[in-house]
Amino acid sequence: ERERWGSRVSFILAAIGSAIGLGNFWRFPFLVYRWGGGSFFIPYIISLFVLGIPMLILELSIGQVFQTAAVAGMAKVNKRYSGLGVAGVTLEGAGNGIYEYVGNWNMENLKDGQMWVDAATQIFFSLSLAFGVMQAYGSFNEPNSNVVQNAIIIAVSNCMFSFVTGFVVFSIIGHLTHIQGIPFDALTVGGPGLAFVTYPAALSLMPGVSANIFCVIFFLTFFMLGIDSAFSMVEGIVANLEETRLFGRLSRPTLLICTCALGCLGSMLYAADIGYLMLDLIDFYINNFCLLVIVLMEAYSVGWGHDRKAMIKLVGLKASVMFEIFVSGGILCVTFLVFLLWEFTPGSVAYGIGFGLGGITMIIGILLSIHFGAIYVRNNGNEIGEMSHYQTSLFVLCLHQPNNAAKILNRAITNGDGSESNWTVGHAWSLLIKFVVPSCCSILLAFTARSIGRQNGYEGYPVGFQLLGAFVSLFVISTIPLAMAFPNLSLKKHALASTNEKNISSGLEYEDNELEVGADIVVSSGEDKKDLNNNQQDKY
C-alpha cells in the first residue's frame, strides 16, 4: 500500500515548500539585478507558461497516474527513458532600488540569449523540475487528484514568492547604494552573496531592537526554506532508489540515513575556503546544462518516444521516420548554425540563417511526411472519423503521441469526488510538449555553450574548477544514455511491467491481450485481436 498525503492541502503546501527555497531568496533577485531590472520578467513569464507549467503538469501526472517515482514512472512512458518584505521598503533609498526592480526595463538585454537561458533554468530550478521531486510527490496523491489545478497553484505561488522577494532585495540594495553614495549598478552583488552578505548587512543597519528581531525572523525563514527543500530532495532520491533492483532490498530508514549521510559529506565541500566558488560553479553547470538536457529528454520521451508502433501502423514507417528526422534535423540546424555563426556574423544574421535554414528543412520534411503518410492512410483505409487522408496524416504525425498521453492523463483528472473535471490538458499542451519544449531547450543549450566559449569558461574561473563543474554536469547527464541502453538492469520487474491501462509505453499490445486505442482499451482474445485501423474512429 503506497503512502498517501493526509489531504490535498498537505500535498500542495509540501510541493510549494519544495519549489520555494533559497534560490527564490537569492537566485531570482540576483538574475533580475544581473539583467538590469524588469526586462527579465518578459522571458521569465514566457518560460513559466510555455515551459514551466506544461512540464510541471507532466511530472506531477507521471507520478500520480503511475503511482511511482521518477525513474519507474518514465520507464512506464518508455522503459528506455527510465534514467530522466515588511521591513526593507521602509529603508532610506529603498525607493531607488524598487524603481530599478520594476521601473527600469532594459529591452536591449532581450537580444542576449543567455538572459533567456537564465529565465528558463530559474523556472526549472525553482519549480523543482527535472530533479525527480515532483514525480515522487505526485505519486503519493490519490490517482484522481486534479493535477492541472495543483500544478497551476504550485507554479503561481512559487513565482509570486519570488516576485515579492525581489522587492525585499532591491529595496535593501537601494538602501546600501544610498548610504555608500554609489550608483545602483556599481554595487558588487554575487548570487549567494545576496543571502549571506547583503541581507545581513542591511539588517545590521536597522535601528534599535528591531534589528535583533528581524535577524531572528530572517535566519528562521532561511532555515525553514532550506529544510523544506532538503526534505523534497531526499524524498525524490529515496523514492527512486526504492524502485531499483540494487537498492530496493534495503529498508526505507536505511536509505534515508545513507542518503542524508552522503549529502552531508558532499556538502562539506561548500564549507571550505573554495565553497562559494564551487557553489557558484556547480549551480551554473547543473542549472544551465543538466536541467535543460533532462527537461528536453522528458518532453521528448512523451512527445516522440512512446506509442510509435501505433503511429507507424496508422501512417506507415516511411512517413513516421521522415517526420522525425526532418523535424529533429531542423531543430539541430537552428541550434548549431546559431551557435557557429554567432561569433562571425551579427546576431541578426546568425538568427536569420539559423532559423531560416532550420525552418525550410522542417517545412520540406513535414510536407513530404504528410504526403507519404496520406498515401499510406488512403491505401489502408486508416482515415480517422470524417478526416481526409491528408488531415489524418497531419494529425497523427503531429499530435498522436502526446495527445494519446494527454487522454490517458486526463482520465485521472477529476474534481476529487470522481466527477469529470474541466481542468484537463488538451492539444495546446500536446503541441508544447512535442515541439516547443524540446526546441527551446535545444536552442538554450546552444546559447549556454556559446556564452561559455565567449567568456573563456564561466566567469573566468580557473580551468581546473571549470573542468570539475563540467565533470559533475556530464556525470549526471551520462546516466541517461546508460539507463536507455540497459533499462532492465536498474528497475525492479514490477516497475517495468505493462500494467494494463497504467502503461503508455506500448500503444498496441498489453500482457492481458489488450489493445489500446488512444485513451480507450479494446479487449480482444488470442489471435483474434482487432486490427488497429478498424478502431481508429474511436481513437480521438
Image (spheres, helix red, strand yellow):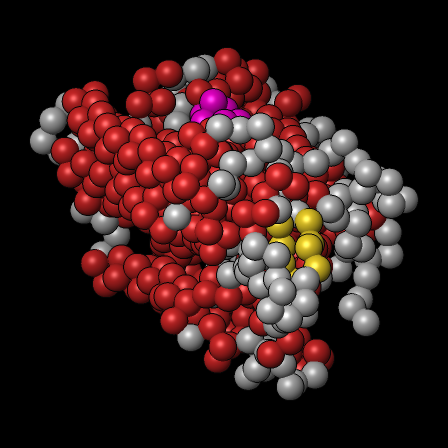
Viewer-proximal residue among 463 and 187: 463
Where residue 223 sits, quadrant-wise, is bottom right
What residue do we see at 43% from left, 37% from top? 378
Q: Please indicate whether residue 355 sits to the left or right of residue 34 in the image.
A: left
Q: Which residue is nearer to you in this view: 306 or 244?
A: 306
Quadrant including the C terminus: top right
Q: Nearer the viewer, residue 279 or 19?
A: 19
Tell me the residue at 79%/47% (across/down): 145
Q: Main secondary structure of the magenta part?
A: helix
How far from the left and from the top, in percent, is residue 285?
36, 53
Question: Relative to residue 509, is residue 46 drawn left or right?
Answer: left
Quarter of the picture containing the N terminus is bottom right
Q: Is residue 444 above or below residue 517?
A: above
The residue that appears at 37% across and 66% down in the rendered structure is 481
Residue 495 colored in magenta in the image: no
Query: Does any portion of residue 253 appear in the rendered image?
Result: yes
Residue 43 lies in magenta, yes or no?
yes
Q: Nearer the viewer, residue 230 or 324?
A: 324
Please state the extent of the stretch shown in magenta in the rendering: 40-48
Quarter location, residue 253:
bottom right
Who's the residue at 55% across and 84% down the image?
A: 246
Furthest residue toward right: 417
Image location of residue 163, percent across then percent down: 60, 29
Where's residue 153, x and y in %?
Answer: 71, 36
Residue placed farthest to the bottom in the image?
A: 249
